[in-house]
Image (cartoon, grey):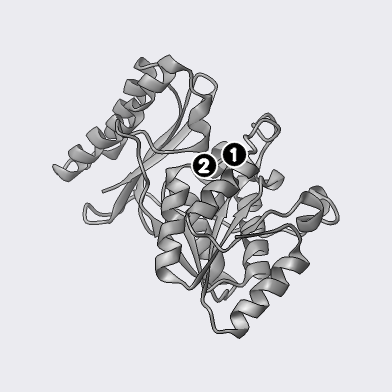
Amino acid sequence: MQILETIVDARAVLATARSERQRIALVPTMGNLHAGHLSLVQKARQLCDRVIVSIYVNPLQFGAGEDFANYPRTLDADCQQLRQAGVDWVFSPDDQGLYPAGKDQSAFIEVPGLSSILEGRSRPGHFRGVATVVNKLFNIVQPEMAIFGEKDFQQLLVIRRMVVDLNLAVEVVGMPTLREADGLAMSSRNQYLSASERKQASTLYQVLNATREQLLAGVTDYSRLTSEAIETLHACGFSPDYFEIRRCDDLQLPRTPGDNKVILAAARLGRTRLIDNLPV
């Protein structure tokens, strides 16, 4: 496995692979890898000839007061896991490489509509940062495929919309959320939970499941379902940011009972912000 730290090096190596007609899959990450990330790598290896994993903690997608400075940076341990997983390259650029004029003076990509609701309402500017850095990675790597987890469901839709709107030649593949034994969605931020909070954290998944069961049973009073879920989370020690039932394709409110739906939630437990979703 080769570690690439500059855009020049990455482009040179990838150009050689493309000249040999090898299909390349990209798995974008911020590092601090867990089994969920490795499942994306496994899928990438199944779909393409060569796999590149990016590791970059992107400052543009963190807002004021968020955990950018304290976000876990574990490059050596990450590379060890990726080497064992059969990854060909790790692309680990620095801020100067991706934002040569500084992040505040950088050109950016913004996906209207999808970026301002739900997670975007709670974290203004977050999806501008996501779309910008993913577009940069797509331009640098030029992969045939890019693999993302569905835990960040809204992020996945934002990236898919960007790819369509900008006519990018990359297939975006979503992979189901990988969970702990008690249902908690795997996340690098789970390590922020205290021991008691960790025991409580799976309640979020339980509430998502309970709401899903009511939807499958034919309940269509979405407002009541979301209000009840928020009350339950409050009673269990969470501070919910949102708990919403939306359409899968565009995250708008369902129009008919037959719409394909997804339940999305974000809530704080102590100092840890958890997000999760469950398709219906």
| Nearer-the-camera pick, 177 or 50 | 50
**Residue visible at 28% across and 39% down in the picture:** 222
**Residue 45 found in image quarter:** bottom left
In the displayed structure, 189 sits above or below 45; it is: above
- The local secondary structure at tag 1 comes to loop
> Can you give x and y, in whole percent of width and height, for residue 223 in the image?
31, 35
* Mark 1 residue crowding within 10 angstroms, few (<14) / some (14–19) / many (20+): some
**Residue visible at 23% across and 33% down in the picture:** 210
Q: Which mark is residue 100?
A: none
Mark 2 vs 1: CB contact within 8 A:
yes
* Mark 2 residue crowding within 10 angstroms, few (<14) / some (14–19) / many (20+): many
| Residue at the outermost left position | 217
Task: Locate residue 183 relative to residue 140 in the image: left or right.
Answer: left
Q: How many marks?
A: 2
Q: CA distance from mark 2 to mark 1?
A: 6 Å
Identify residue for label 2: 119
**Residue visible at 37% across and 44% down in the picture:** 178
> Can you give x and y, in whole percent of width and height, for residue 239 in the image?
46, 22
Task: Locate residue 148 relative to residue 123 in the image: left or right.
Answer: left
> Can you give x and y, in whole percent of width and height, for residue 83 in the image?
54, 54
- The local secondary structure at tag 2 comes to helix
Residue type pointed to by label 1: Arg
Identify residue for label 1: 123
Q: Say if residue 273 shows up in the picture.
A: no
**Residue 197 found in image quarter:** top left
Task: Locate residue 244 relative to residue 83 in the image: left or right.
Answer: left
Residue type pointed to by label 2: Glu
In the displayed structure, 234 sits above or below 144; it is: above
> Can you give x and y, in whole percent of width and height, for residue 129 in the image?
66, 50
| Nearer-the-camera pick, 236 or 112 | 236
